[in-house]
Amino acid sequence: MGPVPRTLELFYDVLSPYSWLGFEILCRYQNIWNINLQLRPSFLGGIIKDSENKPPALVPRKGQYMANDIKLLRQHVQVPIQFPKDFFSVVLEKGSLSAMRFLTAVNLEHPEMLQNVSRELWMRIWSRAAEKAGMSAEQAQGLLEKSSTSKVKNQLKETTEAACRYGAFGLPITVAHVDGQTHMMFGSDRMELLAYLLGEKWMGPVPQAVNARL
């Protein structure tokens, strides 16, 4: 019998491009490292407000840096990520509350679909995302209806508050539970340090074991 897998919690929001990068990297390593990966859909807007932070895209110099950074990371991490043309409309007007409530409903009702639906939400509008992720129209409609229930709203609120208690000031954060200690790491660029903490081997954002299966 081998060592017990260490638990990793990934708190993320589909409004955050760096959340997508961290999500894909950890999904690639979940069957390579000895870990139990727990996906925790959260609400970035609530974390930003609670921490009195400001979205980087709304700070001109940070926004420009972020746009250039994403272009490089798209190639390096091999994730088809790019800024939407109406990015500021999405950030300032639409937000992600409805999407994250939908993902919370998926997690409560069909947790086995959470990874695929989350991925498709980053790539497409969420109504098409559910269909592309293998969810029937009836399932999607049922989850949309449940997204407005108190159960789903409270669960998303509790998850977001949990991220805040860990010290989140943005997303993604990865919380590692190792040897009775809890470690919070911010961003998608801390994976090498995470590997060191876990005593695992870091093989870059696209490990060879993944390439071998493609």
Image (cartoon, rainbow, N blue to C red):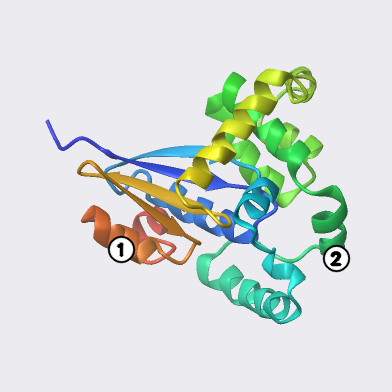
Residue 8 on image: x %, y %: 38, 43
Seen from the viewer's position, the closer of residues 126 and 9 is: 9
Count of labels in the image: 2
Q: Find numbered disc 2 in the image and state the secondary structure of the residue it sits on.
A: loop
Residue in the image at 30% along x and 59% along y = 195
Work out which quarter of the rendered image holds the N terminus and state it.
top left
**Residue 203 shows in this picture:** no
- Whether residue 138 appears in this view of the structure is yes
Disc 1 + disc 2, Cβ < 8 Å? no
Three-letter residue code for mark 1: Trp
Of pointers 1 and 2, the one earlier in the residue sequence: 2
Cα distance in 3D space between marks 1 and 2: 35 Å
Crowding around mark 2 (Cα neighbors within 10 Å: few <14, some 14 to 19, many 20+) is: few
Question: Would you say 20 lies left or right of 85 here?
Answer: left
Q: Position of residue 158 (x, y in %)?
A: 57, 32
Which residue is found at the position 20% from the left and 44% from the top? 179
Which residue does the numbered mark 1 point to in the structure image?
202
Coordinates of residue 145 in the picture (x, y in percent): 79, 20
Above or below residue 128? Residue 83 is below
What residue does disc 2 label?
Answer: 85
Q: Residue at x 35, y 61 (%)?
A: 208
Q: Of the residues shown, which amino acid type is indicated by label 2?
A: Lys
Residue 181 in the image: above or below residue 133: below
Residue count near mark 1 (Cα–Cα under 10 Å), binned few <14, some 14–19, many ≥20: some
Height in image: 34 above or below 172? above
SS type, badge 1: loop
Q: Nearer the viewer, residue 193 or 50?
A: 50
